[in-house]
Amino acid sequence: MDMDKGCLLGISVSPASLTGLDMGYARISGCSFDEHYSNCGYSVALGTNGFTWEQINTWEKPMLDPAVPTGSFMMVNSSGRASGQKAHLLLPTLKENDTHCIDFHYYFSSRDRSSPGALNVYVKVNGGPQGNPVWNVSGVVTEGWVKAELAISTFWPHFYQVIFESVSLKGHPGYIAVDEVRVLAHPCRKAPHFLRLQNVEVNVGQNATFQCIAGGKWSQHDKLWLQVRMGEARSSHLPIPL
């Protein structure tokens, strides 16, 4: 049995100003939503009762609600929604043969200061099941935009797709927004990431062990997600008990 593995490790979040982004890194792809999201290869999946991501550009069409941020971005409006409604923003399929970084900015706001719901990020590998979220945030209202980093290790010939999922919460009107999504051709600066993942081949019925060497800034709250082809995702705090 050949165990094909993809590793996803931790995230880092920090407040950020979208007017002061460091754009000096080599970038594989990304989207700032200044043009239509389809030009970036992105797509949206219509959720229950029309709950979906919308592209907003307040420079072209000002919003009257002060809870809506200024600029161009993707956003969902959770006002008047039942709990658990989901909307999906899908990135194009990516294939990279190394550890690299995806970073993005998110924004949670409401007029009454209650959290509008949850934002989950999934990484679907080789067209398989969506699995568990590799990152999520809920129960917050952000003070401006917050930057998050997601470290991903993929190895040829595997491919993957990143999915942003917003989940509504009944009685909590407000907005969840995403902007400045970048796929960078290097490991994350803050989020832990895998430096090496060895391949293991065993016979049917035998146990397999493998070693992941991780580097980066780590805290006791970081979780490690392992995704195994033809198997279930598994999470653990570092180090991983195998």
Image: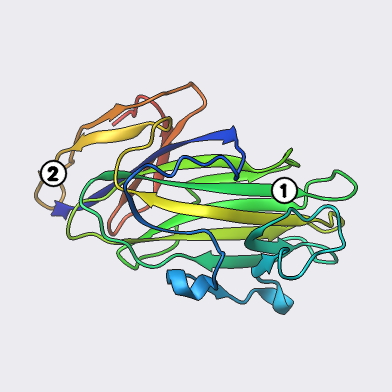
Mark 1 Cα-neighbour bin, 10 Å: few <14, some 14–19, many ≥20: many
Please name whichever residue, 207 or 187, is drawn nearer the observer in this view of the structure: 187
**Residue at the image point whose x is 47% and y is 70% from the top:** 42
Q: Quadrant of the C terminus?
A: top left
**Residue at the image point whose x is 17% and y is 56% from the top:** 156
Kindly identify which residue carries mark 1.
108
Kindly identify which residue carries mark 2.
199
Please name whichever residue, 198 or 91, is drawn nearer the observer in this view of the structure: 91
**Image height of 161 relative to 112, above or below:** below
**Image height of 183 relative to 42, above or below:** above
Residue 31, horizontal then vertical, whole percent: 48, 60
Mark 2 Cα-neighbour bin, 10 Å: few <14, some 14–19, many ≥20: few
Q: Quadrant of residue 177?
A: bottom right
Would residue 179 be found to the left or right of residue 157 on screen? right
Question: Secondary structure beneath disc 2?
Answer: loop
Residue 44, horizontal then vertical, whole percent: 55, 73
